[in-house]
Amino acid sequence: MSEVEKLIKTSQEQAVASWVNYLNQLRIDTLLSSFAKQDVNLRDAITSVDEAMRTIDLEIVLTNRGGHKGMHGFIAEIAEVGVGNAREQILGKGAVYQWVNDNGPVDMVRRGIDIQQKFSAAGGRLSLGAVTEHLGKYPDYVKNGGRYQIPRDHFEKIQTLRSISPDEAVRLLSRSGEGPSFKDWQRVDTFFSEGSIGIDALEPSKLEYRDVQKGAYESTLEAEKDSLRSTDQALRDNAYRGSRPKLQEGAQTTVVAAIVEGGTTFVLAVTAKRREGKRLKDFSEEDWSAIRAETGIGVARGGVRGLSIYSLTNFTVTSAAVASSVVTATFGMAEQAHKFRKGEIDELEFIENSELVCLEAAVGALSSFIGQALIPVPVLGAVIGNTVGTIMYRAVSSNLSKKEVELINRYLSDLRALDEGLSTQHNELIEKLEKSMSSYLVLLERAFSPDMQVALIGSVELARERGAPTEEILDTKDKALSYFLE
């Protein structure tokens, strides 16, 4: 393969790697962007609930607005606005509720729809009595597009009662204890049969009647904040799962890489035949068979390359450029191993060729990495970097003169000689050290012998061995008596 063909081949390989890296980076960038947006969403949602709690504290509870019987109605309005907006904001949507706060026919507006909220337990009428009173004052309220909002538990109970037929309702007369009564059923049936509005004019609040009482709204809103945090975590988990490597994307990468490498191999194979002087129309069946075989190998290699790069970059800490170089080096060494088994090259040639393959793969990876960093355009930077780096490497490696090679070989020879000399000296020193240590240990053993006579003699020998002055060594009885008695 000519130098130009090698350059085209390595550029194509790094282009595939860069494309896979772009796909991976796109997923990561999307995930990080999603997390950043979710940070804002959570902050806005929690702020909405905190503002609702602060408004209730300062404008309702502190001023005793509504008194003992009506305070919970104002609490419900503000809490609905805060919770309703927060549940939209945690999903990345804008606030949808506006609190009117003018004691008029409309308590709040949601996306342009007027809402009158009724939280009333009077007479066990599930807030329907309060709705009837409001309709008496504003008979066209529903006709003009308005809606009534009642506690969620009241709405659910109304739905249950409406599902009971008159025959089944009669049986409720004999029921005692918890559950709907016949009177409850009558009230609901009368409201919808005699009233001017249907169930479509009602909607459930996000809160129940008990949630908005003076002594309960704080825990209700704190629980809502915990729920918002749980929702936030679930959204982040979903975003993370969506950003993980996918089988479909891996398969797509494999197919594209196979097509690209197969196409490159096909073009190079045809070009090689054209260099032999053959025109396309003169290609024989044997020529096309050889081209098909090479192309098939290229497709297979491309598929393996794409799948390997996708796996290495997603499941190990490996950059796309390095992953591609690993695959390239693996293919190259496999080819050299095949030649070695067939006897086409000897062991030394196998090692040298394998080293060269790995070196060239590493040069391509480094060049692509630098090129992508300097030119942050997907694929283009990697191709340009690989092209420039490979050309420079070829120029440097081919321009080493014979004299420079001889100097390098001479330098390596000197290093080997020096290493051998140092190794000999090291072995001699170790041998001397072992002998000295052996003698020292013998003296030490005698100096500390349990036999007093042996220990005294051993101590004298040890002192002489360690270089103590002769006049200070207690080697006679007179010296010993003089030292200890004087």
Image (cartoon, rainbow, N blue to C red):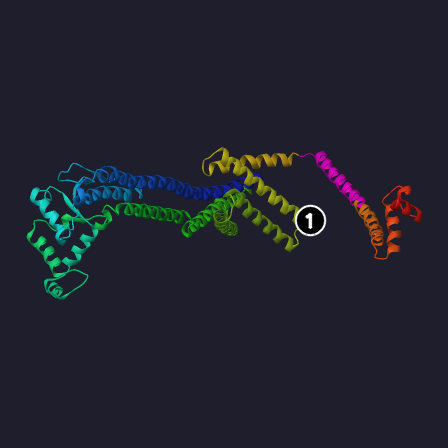
- The percent position of residue 343, horizontal first and vertical second, equals 66, 54
Placement of the C terminus among the 4 image quadrants: top right
- The percent position of residue 42, horizontal first and vertical second, equals 34, 42
Give, as a three-letter code, the residue at label 1: Leu
In this image, 458 relative to 206: left or right? right
Q: Main secondary structure of the magenta part?
A: helix
The residue at the point 51 percent across, 35 percent down is 371
Residue 208 visible? The answer is no
The residue at the point 42 percent across, 52 percent down is 247
Query: SS at mark 1?
Result: helix
Give the residue pinned by disc 1.
Answer: 348
Q: Viewer-proximal residue, 197 or 149? A: 149
Q: Residue furthest front?
A: 486
What is the span of residues highlighted in magenta in the rendered image?
400-425
Count the marks: how many? Answer: 1
The residue at the point 28 percent across, 43 percent down is 88
| Label 1: few (<14), some (14–19) or many (≥20) C-alpha neighbours in 10 Å | few
Residue 14 visible? The answer is yes
In this image, 243 relative to 97: left or right? right
Magenta highlight on residue 343: no
Q: Viewer-proximal residue, 173 or 431? A: 173
In this image, 87 relative to 196: left or right? right
- The percent position of residue 260, horizontal first and vertical second, equals 46, 45
Q: Viewer-proximal residue, 468 or 287? A: 468
Magenta highlight on residue 407: yes
In this image, 146 relative to 459: left or right? left
Instruction: Using the image, determine if residue 121 lies above or below residue 12.
Output: below
Placement of the N terminus among the 4 image quadrants: top right
Q: Viewer-proximal residue, 242 or 262? A: 242
- The percent position of residue 45, horizontal first and vertical second, equals 31, 41
